Amino acid sequence: MTTTVPGPLYQPAGTAAGLESVRGLVNTALDILQEVSAARLGPVAPGGPEGARSAAAKALAGPLLPEQGGDATEVLGDLVRSYAEWSVDITHPAALARMQPPPTDVAAAAELVGAVLNQSLHAWESGPFALELDRWVIAQLAELVGYDSTEAGGTLTSGGSVSNLMAMTMARDTTIADKLGRHAFQEGLLRLGVQPVVLCPQGVHFSIERAVRLLGIGEDNIRTVPIDRDGRMIPAEADRILTELPEGELAVAIVAVAGSTDLGIVDPLPELAVIARKHGVWLHADAAYGAGALFSPRLRGMLDGIAEADSVTMDLHKFGWTPASSAALLVRRAETMLSFGLQPTTCLSADDDTCAGYIGSQNTSLQTTRRVDALKIAVSMRTLGREAVGAMVDTCHDLARHAAARIQAEPKLELGTEPPLTAVLFRYLPGHGLDADAFNGALRRRVMEDGRALLARTHIAEEDGTSRVFLKLMLLNPETTTGQLDRIIDELLATAAEQEAAAAGA
Ligand SMILES: *Cc1c(COP(=O)(O)O)cnc(C)c1O
């Protein structure tokens, strides 16, 4: 009888041989990224959605799982090349659409370490140091918000949307438990016989609306709090809504926006905190974008009172310069995370492992297996230091103000508002009776299809209930210069004039 000794089935990354192999593969990939980067003409390849589709059709010929596998260097090289060629170059000064900052080098290196070691956070034995690191990063971020770190808690999440969902879950469960002495997560909403209600300003991030849907509260039970001329929730109106709430309705949360995505509006946090306390309602601050102001001595005052909120959403993959996912939900009192724990209290569960300190983080997360984002956040922040991060935030703010001043000086452009943070809203004003909304929408698509600039679009609601299309520049690249910004605006004006002439002649 002969036994065949099988060869290795695959090359794991973390062994001595694997680490050498990873080194070689990374070098190959980086060489390709450098080649592609040198050949770039703009922030995205020209061709628009059609171009991306045909590039993908070419690169992805054949099945995901072919009968016979290929050589790692070749497989990686081929796909990385196409992926890179059709990536948005977020380091390009004209990549101005989305809140994707160019991440730091050291954060990218830490991501690789994270992948090789493949730790997880759900149990002590899935990543002992990773768990310590994760808890430390959370405690440090809680301090940044101004929370008392001995009482505060939180979790890193995959993004602001998940942070907001978790915050709304805790708001629902904590408020109902405080008022009725019963647990919504146990009995279900129907048996409690109350209808939860959530107070939000108009224009709250859609992830809050989605959370309200998912939690069985129902979108119809959002009470929109009127806003003042600056777009901020009027605290007295929130107070009135809460005071006049009909029998059978129970307000569980006031959601304050701490830096709205378009206009950078910050709701009056200290006043809302007083009203939330008076009515026993949870105050959530959505600072997914705005939390960047915390790094800047110049802008920090915008977020005064944020530590009065019961929970805060903070994205470091927006301001923070770490790759996604880098995000946090921070809570003023750690015990309110009960909603996510399947045991009522961790240490009273008489679980001998738990009491001996073998504790994972599955009781404070929506996830079980969970990637360790804390490593890249920690090395990136420690490498930069507070002064540099503050200066980066300020520089982006200065760039936004420069763009706003330039736009204001152009007769064919209309500025949305002065940018409190780093988003600049504007629109081109075409003549010849052309529809400005359609014109600006088409202008944006045109520069994207040409691969010359990436802009976002939004709409601003008017008092009469209508809304107008605006284009948006999102400035999160502190390496961009004012000269580059000027040239981008010049080009945009030239393209718009061409489009206007063509439309007028048509
Ligand atoms: C970006 C953003 C979110 C969503 O965050 P993700 O990380 O993209 O999930 C929520 N709220 C506000 C105000 C945001 O700007």
Image (cartoon, rainbow, N blue to C red):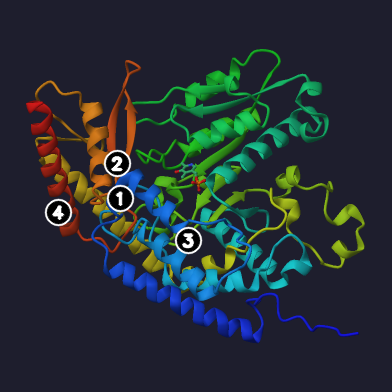
Q: Residues within 10 Å of mark 1 (few under 14, many from 20)?
A: many
- State which tag comes first along the sequence, 1 or 4: 1
Q: Residues within 10 Å of mark 4 (few under 14, many from 20)?
A: few
Question: Which x, y percent locates residue 173?
Answer: 72, 35
**Figure check: 69 above or below 182:** below
Q: Amino acid at mark 2?
A: Lys
**Figure check: 73 above or below 200:** below
> Element under label 1?
loop
Write down the residue under mark 3. 323
Q: Residues within 10 Å of mark 2 (few under 14, many from 20)?
A: many
> Element under label 3?
loop
Write down the residue under mark 2. 472
- State which tag comes first along the sequence, 1 or 3: 1
Write down the residue under mark 4. 487
Question: Which x, y percent locates residue 287?
Answer: 48, 45
Q: Distance of mark 3 from mark 4, alpha carbons?
A: 28 Å
407 and 488: which is toward the camera: 488
Q: CB under 8 Å between callouts 2 and 1?
A: yes
Q: Amino acid at mark 3?
A: Pro
Q: Residue at x 30, y 50 (%)?
A: 96
> Element under label 2?
strand
- State which tag comes first along the sequence, 2 or 4: 2
Q: Distance of mark 2 from mark 3, alpha carbons?
A: 22 Å
471 and 476: which is toward the camera: 471
> Element under label 4?
helix
- State which tag comes first along the sequence, 2 or 3: 3
Q: Amino acid at mark 1?
A: Leu
Q: Distance of mark 1 from mark 4, alpha carbons?
A: 13 Å
The disc placed on residue 96 is 1
